[in-house]
Structure formats: structure tokens, C-alpha cells
Image (tube, helix red, strand yellow):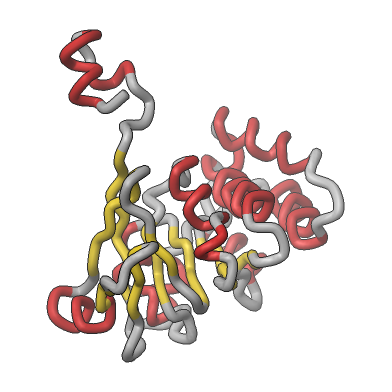
Amino acid sequence: MSRADAVLHLGNAESVRAGNVQGVFVRTIKPNVVIRRNGSAELLDVSFLTALSGGAAILLAEERKWEFSGTIATIENEEAFWRHHMVLPEIDLAIYVRGKMSNRLLQWLASAPMANCQITHWGDYDPIGVLEYVRLQRSCIGRVRLHVPDGLEDLVARFGKRRLVQSDKQTQALSSLRRVAGNEIVAQLVEMFERQGKGVEQEILLALTRPV
């Protein structure tokens, strides 16, 4: 059901958790990056649109699907997305996931037309952010890595916030991460969160790469 139908029939758009369509922002700093519409010769020139306006948007819907081949970054927060080139200049296509990734976005990234994409997840360094990496990794098996900068624990110790580990939702996420088996990086980050009692927001990497 769409949110419009939810208002018509139920009197409340929020009674539908996710509507039947979703818009997604994408951008690139590389030349000749295009997204192809499935079953069509139509192309979205992301390079041109990024140079013109900063980025582009696509609509994910049952009747409108897209394919891409290259490296992708899924990025949690807005400023990190718009300035992704400061931290991940090697990435072909950046995707703004706006916090928790929707199931529709995960299904698109896991779909056959996207099977040639290698994915880097860059989110906040807190239990919820790491749990999003785990969700993505489970959907796109063998194609996902987490961006972890050198010296992350020092950044957490210096710039971290306790609420990013100790709030109720973060505590629940940390409990879920403890049950993740066979993932060395997740285990290391769980140990770091427990040792430091803090997490740090991804924007710290932007601040530290800002030109002097």
C-alpha cells in the first residue's frame, strides 16, 4: 500500500511503515559514471548531474529498477554523503542511506543487476552503525566491507560520546552484535565499544581531512 492509499483508507500515512516507492540520492566524483535502467537503453549520467547540481536521485519502485557495475559506498549521514570524496575518493558511486537502510534499498543492492558491485559501508562508529553493516553484509554476501580508519580507537577515546554506546537502542544493538559469529571486524569493534564505553560519529573523519 502507498502512503497516499493509507491516508485514504486508514486516515494515517504513518500506518504504512514503508510506502511503495523510495527516492535515493546518489553522487560521484568520477567521470563517465552512469546508472542503467533495467531492460532499457536509458542511462542516468551521474557524473554530469553531480558536476551540475551536486548529485542525482533515482526512484526505487517495482516498475522502475536500476543496474550498476563498479564500487559503491553506502553512507549513513547527510554531510558525509555530500562530501564523501574527502574520505572515499576511490569509490565510483556514493549512496545516501539516511540512517537505517530500508529493506527496499537492501533488496536493490542484493539484486542480480547489482551483483558486480563491491560495496563499502561507511556509517557512525557505534553499535547501530555497525549493525547496519551486518545487515548489508548478510544481504550482499561476499561483496561488503566496512570502512574502518586507522587509529579508530584513538578517535573514539578523544572525540567519542557515551550515548553512542549506552543509550537504550545502542545497548540493544550491541547485544545483537555480540551474537554475530565469524566476523572478525565486528568482534573487534564490540570489544572496542565495551572497552571505551563510547562511539564516535562518522563526521569526525571529515573534520580531520579538512584542508589546512
Vertical arrangement, residue 170 with respect to residue 81, above or below:
above
User: Residue drawn at (32%, 16%), measured in percent from left and top?
Assistant: 15
Near-viewer residue (23 or 168): 23
Near-viewer residue (50 or 196): 50
Quarter of the image for the N terminus: give it.
Answer: top left
Vertical arrangement, residue 82 with respect to residue 167, above or below:
below
Q: Residue furthest left?
A: 52
Near-viewer residue (47 or 132): 47
Q: Residue furthest top?
A: 10
User: Residue drawn at (19%, 77%), measured in percent from left and top?
Assistant: 49
Task: Answer left or right for 28 relative to 73.
Answer: left
User: Residue drawn at (28%, 58%), measured in percent from left and top?
Assistant: 58
* Rendering coords of residue 52 (x, y %): 13, 80
* Rendering coords of residue 17 (x, y %): 38, 25
Quick check: can you spot residue 113?
A: yes
User: Residue drawn at (48%, 53%), measured in percent from left and top?
Assistant: 108
Near-viewer residue (153 or 52): 52
* Rendering coords of residue 153 (x, y %): 66, 65
Vertical arrangement, residue 50 with respect to residue 174, above or below:
below
The image quarter in which residue 164 lies: top right
Task: Answer left or right for 212 relative to 106.
Answer: left
Quick check: can you spot residue 211?
A: no
Question: What is the count of numbered marks?
Answer: 0
Quarter of the image for the C terminus: give it.
Answer: bottom left
Task: Answer left or right for 37 relative to 127.
Answer: left
The image quarter in which residue 89 lies: bottom left
* Rendering coords of residue 146 (x, y %): 63, 65
Vertical arrangement, residue 103 with respect to residue 69, above or below:
above
